[in-house]
Image: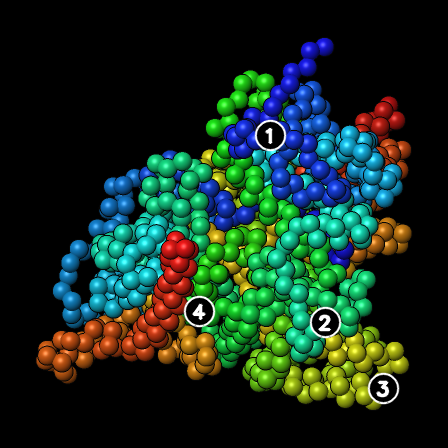
């Protein structure tokens, strides 16, 4: 019985968690909302916090109840309609962040946000089905109120409501067995989440202890490499190992990325299976007090071997050169702690103490060269090699916020929302070439509005430009087109499957 | 004594006027796919159900205590012999119908289905019933001999596709990683099954099988996991069906009271605050300023959180939850809790504090949102909840610390006895985290106790809740005080 400890712990947890003390914060959130007494469950959040659950280090799962009037007030506190041109760029900078003023947001929703494609993406079918109509959408309004359990019959209705409420962002939740707006009317048991895309969240926060180039909310191209590598490794695993075909990667707007696995099979996974997939992919585990965060059995699982091969390519550039984590003499302990042989470690320490400015690359090379010189009698070459593999994994293997993936009812920010801190659009990342994606190049909302104006100014309101959709006049175009292609591939497959199913049913009826 | 012949009403609704017949039990392992159809007496109905319930309760207790499979088996087996024996075909030899063998199997079969009726009603009961029944099935399956196991596989067709030799050869490179740990199959000759990955979540979770295109290649040695999964999934689905059918069960008042009574008997053991200690402190009497002085009575997990909080003037979400609810448990009122966290988060502005943290604290006290009065987390919850990530300090130190850091932390509590440290290391390796914690409790209190000749209850029940650790420690300190006072007189 090689795997029973895991079972027992799992069982133990579920057995012991009485309804009152069940602990998952996400569930808490859900339960709260389900039982909240006044109709729309709304809450106050720190906007930055909500924006990426992990953007700050605090996870917030909380909200308060508001009256309808307050929501109305929040929604209408922004001018209802306004002229669509001439926003002076300075006004944008003065307020919230680089560009996300309520005025700009509203224009963005009106003219640029791809509502139709978003609808098709969530619906998998041209005409509205329960995949869309029973889907929870949650809004974060400009005053930080949080409005859960919204749903819409059509994308037009959704667009109207988004423009009216003008939320600073919105999140996508699961498809429920009944319309989320009716959750008070239907029996409790009849209202449960049925399916949702399998989602993953990678955030730079989890790399803070190893990245040396930036800290906090900052990012640069050096540390973005962590995310690039993470996308490569996870994308292969999802496609090759699990056989998923429709994996959408989305920039989170600041310093992370989300993955949405949209295959039917992925959408239908229950919590236990989601947890299984997330744990399968999670190698780096452990808190502040566990020295070694990668502990793997040998021989390595084929997935780990493959990941290692991918990581090795960028280890020397991303870690040894760019991050250079062990250059300072006081930082070498971190590396030595991960190596197994005491005698070798002493020799390495001695050598590194005398040189004050030795690069990480050369220190990494020292490990093997000293080992070959035979400074340690007890050295186990295999053990050392394995420890070095673990170092590569610990520094470069994707660090997942696994909790996000484990629950069917976890909400995740919609693609094409605006990050209020940066003003950047949460655009899709082409997973075939993640290395070409540069977060600094992602258009901001104010830039996009300027681009429309600029285009209209230079091209006039000629016939040809009238025909163009607004996004086609801007640098958002390639991202929207990528999303269109993704959605149409997904829809094609869903409809093919549906036809097959219908055919089979038809045949059996004939028979 | 009048014995009411009671036909099982559920079966009647399902099967109409089907002829009542005895079922055949060719072997003792039963997946319980077919409900029993024969009549039994009301007395049997209740007695059999209670006997099975005894077993399931014991299993649940073991799970709750985080006992491993072997220990659970050892605890449950004698009870099984007594209340729900199931003898194999080979031992007593199969005699005619109505023999002891058939009676045993019938009892097993019927009692399972009776309890289904009792436990299908709520989500929680269903979940617990499935867990406990699956463990029971596991114990029986693993103690069955190989022919019985094969018979089970032959009887129930699970639809697993065997991997052809050609495919096996072409994938040998990938399949071989798992063979080194397989217990009884030789690596090259091991056979594999192909199943959709959704069917074997626990094998996926622990990366025990090779996965390609959504198909898991399960070595024959891992069959157990497949079968258990099959068992619990079928049972789960069946319970849901039963739950839906139950209201339509046109029942008189003979069965329902029994069923209601049965489900009440299946209560998970839980930590209940001991009034004798919290009473001494008085609930709600601990003040924010006193927390630091009480730290010596905290278990290691809470000390870790406390010192991290003091060092960083901050704790992340899960840490705040774990520590905050613990403090609530030792008697911090909500006002005191707000004071405590406000002063502890010294680097944060008043505005940020009320915006981000105030709500959560009040929420834990049932003053916000759904107004649920949350309880402190138990060890089982702490062990299995989200593991701490980078820069997080929650969780159980015995589980989540590296061994060196753990030993250093325990030495920091003043434990230097090598025997104790070795014991802790062994416990941790055996994943007996609560035993390790109890050991440390004994070691840290022995020194204090020895001075005034107060013994630490050796052989006491192990710590299963951080607040239990605290309560015991307080109680102990009080005893020591009394003894010292008396000797002082």
Quadrant that contains the C terminus of chain A: bottom left
Q: Which mark lies nearer to you, 1 or 3?
A: 1
Residue B177 is labelled as 2
Q: Earlier in the sequence, mark 3 or mark 4?
A: 4
Gap between marks 3 and 4 measured at Cα: 51 Å
Q: Nearer the viewer, residue A116 or A383?
A: A116
Q: Is residue B346 left or right of residue A101?
A: right
Q: Is residue A495 left or right of residue B153?
A: left
Q: Chain of mark 1?
A: B
User: What residue did someone put label 3 on?
Assistant: A374
Q: Chain of mark 3?
A: A
How dense is the environment of label 2, judged by Cα within 10 Å: few (below 14), some, or many (20 and up)?
Answer: many
Q: Nearer the viewer, residue B429 or B305?
A: B429
Residue A253 is labelled as none
Q: Are marks 1 and 2 on the same chain?
A: yes
Which residue is at 18% across, 76% downward?
A: A468
Secondary structure under the numbered disc 4 in the rendered image: loop
Q: Earlier in the sequence, mark 1 or mark 2?
A: 1
Is mark 1 in CB contact (under 8 Å) with mark 3?
no
Q: Is residue A79 left or right of residue B71?
A: left
User: What residue did someone put label 4 on?
Assistant: A246
Q: Nearer the viewer, residue B181 or A401?
A: B181
Q: Quadrant of residue A392?
A: bottom right
């Amino acid at each position: 019985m090689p795997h029973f400890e895991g079972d027992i712990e799992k069982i133990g947890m579920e057995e012991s968690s009485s309804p009152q003390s069940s602990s998952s914060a996400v569930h808490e959130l859900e339960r709260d909302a389900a039982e909240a007494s006044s109709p729309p469950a709304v809450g106050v959040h720190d906007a930055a916090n909500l924006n990426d659950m992990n953007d700050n280090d605090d996870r917030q799962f909380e909200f308060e109840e508001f009256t309808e009037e307050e929501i109305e007030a929040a929604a209408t506190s922004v001018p209802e309609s306004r002229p669509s041109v001439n926003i002076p760029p300075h006004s944008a900078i003065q307020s919230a962040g680089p560009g996300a003023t309520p005025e700009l947001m509203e224009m963005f929703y009106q003219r640029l946000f791809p509502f139709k494609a978003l609808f098709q993406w969530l619906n998998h079918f041209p005409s509205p089905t329960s995949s869309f109509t029973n889907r929870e959408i949650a809004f974060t309004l400009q005053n930080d109120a949080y409005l859960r359990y919204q749903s819409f019959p059509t994308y037009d209705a959704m667009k109207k409501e988004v423009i009216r409420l003008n939320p600073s962002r919105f999140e996508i939740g699961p498809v429920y067995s009944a319309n989320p707006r009716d959750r008070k009317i239907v029996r409790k048991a009849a209202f449960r989440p049925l399916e949702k895309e399998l989602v993953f969240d990678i955030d730079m926060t989890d790399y803070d202890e190893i990245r040396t180039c930036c800290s906090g909310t900052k990012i640069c191209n050096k540390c973005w490499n962590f995310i690039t590598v993470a996308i490569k490794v996870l994308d292969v695993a999802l496609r090759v190992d699990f056989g998923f075909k429709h994996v959408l990667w989305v920039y989170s707007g600041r310093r992370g990325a989300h993955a949405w696995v949209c295959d039917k099979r992925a959408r239908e996974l229950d919590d236990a299976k989601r947890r299984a997939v997330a744990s399968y992919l999670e190698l780096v585990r452990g808190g502040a007090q566990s020295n070694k965060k990668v502990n793997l059995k040998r021989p390595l699982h084929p997935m780990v071997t493959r990941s290692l091969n991918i990581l090795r390519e960028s280890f020397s550039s991303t870690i040894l050169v760019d991050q250079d984590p062990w250059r300072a003499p006081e930082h070498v302990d971190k590396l030595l702690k991960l190596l197994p042989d005491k005698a070798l470690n002493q020799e390495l320490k001695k050598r590194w103490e005398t040189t004050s400015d030795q690069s990480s690359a050369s220190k990494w090379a020292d490990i093997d060269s000293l080992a070959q010189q035979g400074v340690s009698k007890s050295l186990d070459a295999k053990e050392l090699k394995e420890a070095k593999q673990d170092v590569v994994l610990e520094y470069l293997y994707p660090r997942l916020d696994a909790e996000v993936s484990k629950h069917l009812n976890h909400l995740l920010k919609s693609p094409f929302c605006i990050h209020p801190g940066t003003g950047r659009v949460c655009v899709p990342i082409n997973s075939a070439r993640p290395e070409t994606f540069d977060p600094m190049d992602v258009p901001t909302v104010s830039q996009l509005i300027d681009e429309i104006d600029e285009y209209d100014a230079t091209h006039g309101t000629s016939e040809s430009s009238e025909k163009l959709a607004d996004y086609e006049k801007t640098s958002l175009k390639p991202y929207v087109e990528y999303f269109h292609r993704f959605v149409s591939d997904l829809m094609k497959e869903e409809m093919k499957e549906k036809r097959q199913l219908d055919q089979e049913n038809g045949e059996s009826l004939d028979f | 004594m009048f014995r009411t012949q009671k036909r099982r009403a559920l079966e009647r609704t399902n099967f109409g006027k089907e002829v009542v017949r005895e079922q055949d039990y060719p072997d003792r392992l039963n997946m319980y796919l077919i409900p029993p159809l024969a009549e039994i007496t009301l007395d049997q109905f209740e007695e059999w159900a209670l006997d099975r319930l005894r077993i399931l309760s014991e299993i649940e207790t073991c799970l709750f205590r985080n006992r491993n499979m072997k220990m659970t088996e050892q605890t449950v087996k004698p009870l099984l012999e007594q209340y729900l024996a199931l003898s194999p075909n080979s031992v007593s030899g199969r005699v005619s119908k109505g023999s002891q063998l058939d009676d045993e199997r019938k009892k097993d079969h019927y009692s399972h289905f009776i309890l289904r009726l009792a436990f299908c009603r709520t989500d929680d009961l269903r979940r617990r019933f499935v867990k406990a029944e699956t463990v029971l099935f596991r114990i029986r399956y693993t103690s069955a001999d190989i022919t019985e196991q094969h018979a089970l596989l032959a009887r129930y067709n699970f639809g697993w596709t065997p991997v052809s030799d050609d495919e096996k050869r072409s994938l040998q490179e990938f399949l071989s990683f798992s063979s080194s740990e397989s217990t009884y199959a030789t690596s090259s000759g091991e056979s594999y099954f192909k199943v959709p990955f959704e069917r074997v979540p626990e094998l996926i979770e622990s990366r025990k099988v090779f996965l390609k295109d959504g198909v898991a290649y399960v070595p024959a040695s891992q069959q157990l996991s497949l079968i258990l999964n099959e068992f619990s999934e079928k049972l789960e689905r069946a319970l849901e069906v039963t739950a839906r059918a139950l209201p339509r069960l046109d029942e008189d008042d003979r069965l329902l009271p029994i069923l209601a009574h049965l489900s009440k008997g299946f209560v998970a053991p839980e930590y209940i605050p001991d009034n004798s200690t919290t009473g001494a402190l008085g609930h709600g009497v601990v003040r924010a300023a006193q927390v630091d002085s009480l730290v010596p009575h905290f278990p290691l997990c809470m000390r870790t959180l406390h010192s991290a909080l003091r060092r960083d003037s901050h704790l992340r979400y899960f840490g705040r939850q774990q520590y905050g609810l613990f403090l609530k448990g030792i008697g911090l009122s909500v006002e005191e809790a707000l004071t405590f966290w406000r002063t502890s988060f010294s680097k944060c502005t008043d505005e940020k504090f009320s915006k981000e943290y105030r709500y959560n604290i009040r929420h834990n006290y049932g003053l916000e949102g759904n107004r649920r009065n949350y309880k402190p987390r138990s060890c089982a919850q702490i062990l299995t909840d989200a593991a701490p990530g980078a820069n997080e300090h929650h969780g159980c130190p015995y589980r989540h610390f590296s061994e060196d850091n753990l030993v250093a932390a325990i030495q920091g509590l003043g434990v230097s006895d090598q025997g104790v440290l070795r014991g802790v290391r062994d416990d941790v390796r055996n994943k007996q985290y609560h035993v390790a914690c109890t050991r440390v409790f004994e070691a840290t209190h022995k020194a204090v106790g020895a001075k005034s000749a107060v013994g630490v209850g050796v052989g006491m029940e192990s710590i299963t809740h951080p607040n239990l650790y605290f309560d015991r420690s307080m109680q102990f300190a009080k005893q020591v005080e009394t003894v010292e006072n008396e000797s002082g007189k």
